[in-house]
Amino acid sequence: MGHSYKKIIREIEKIYGVRLRKSQVSEWLRGIHSPFNGCRIPSMDFLEKSPELTYIMGVVSGDGWVVRKRKGSIEVGARP
């Protein structure tokens, strides 16, 4: 037996702090869109440990910066 859209939305909001629209959940379940495609990462649980992630974390905590751009994109930079 499946879960209702409301229950799925409630559980995701409870666990990850992100409120979804019914259409988002519907498109994920029907395979039209992926929940990982173009979405911000609401939890560190979604990040996979890797040398690249370690590098970015070092840049940001050192001489780097992160700027949230329009339309939700993020710019990461560092001084040479």
Image (cartoon, rainbow, N blue to C red):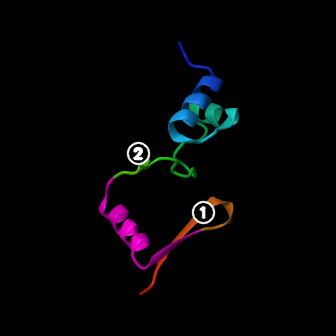
The numbered dot on residue 3 is none
Residue 23 lies, in percent from the top left, at: 69, 35
Residue visible at 52% across and 47% down in the picture? 42
Give the SS element for disc 2. Answer: helix
Residue 74 lies, in percent from the top left, at: 56, 65
* Label 1 Cα neighbours within 10 Å, binned few <14 / some 14-19 / many ≥20: few
Residue 79 higher or lower than 35, as above or below = below
Residue 29 higher or lower than 3, as above or below = below
Of residue 18 and residue 72, the one placed in the foreground of this image is 18
Specify the quadrant of the image occupied by residue 27.
top right
Q: Amino acid at mark 2?
A: Asp
Q: Is residue 27 left or right of residue 41?
A: right
- The residue that disc 1 covers is 73
Q: Amino acid at mark 1?
A: Ser
- The residue that disc 2 covers is 45
User: Residue 1 colored magenta?
Assistant: no
Residue 16 higher or lower than 77, as above or below = above
Q: Is residue 19 left or right of residue 15?
A: right
Give the SS element for disc 1. Answer: loop
Residue furthest to the bottom: 80
Residue 54 higher or lower than 37, as above or below = below
The range drawn in magenta is: 49-67
Q: Is residue 71 left or right of residue 8?
A: right
User: Residue 60 colored magenta?
Assistant: yes
* Quadrant for the C terminus in the image: bottom left
Tell which circle, 2 or 1, labels the residue nearer the N-terminal end.
Answer: 2
Specify the quadrant of the image occupied by residue 62.
bottom left
Residue 72 lies, in percent from the top left, at: 63, 59
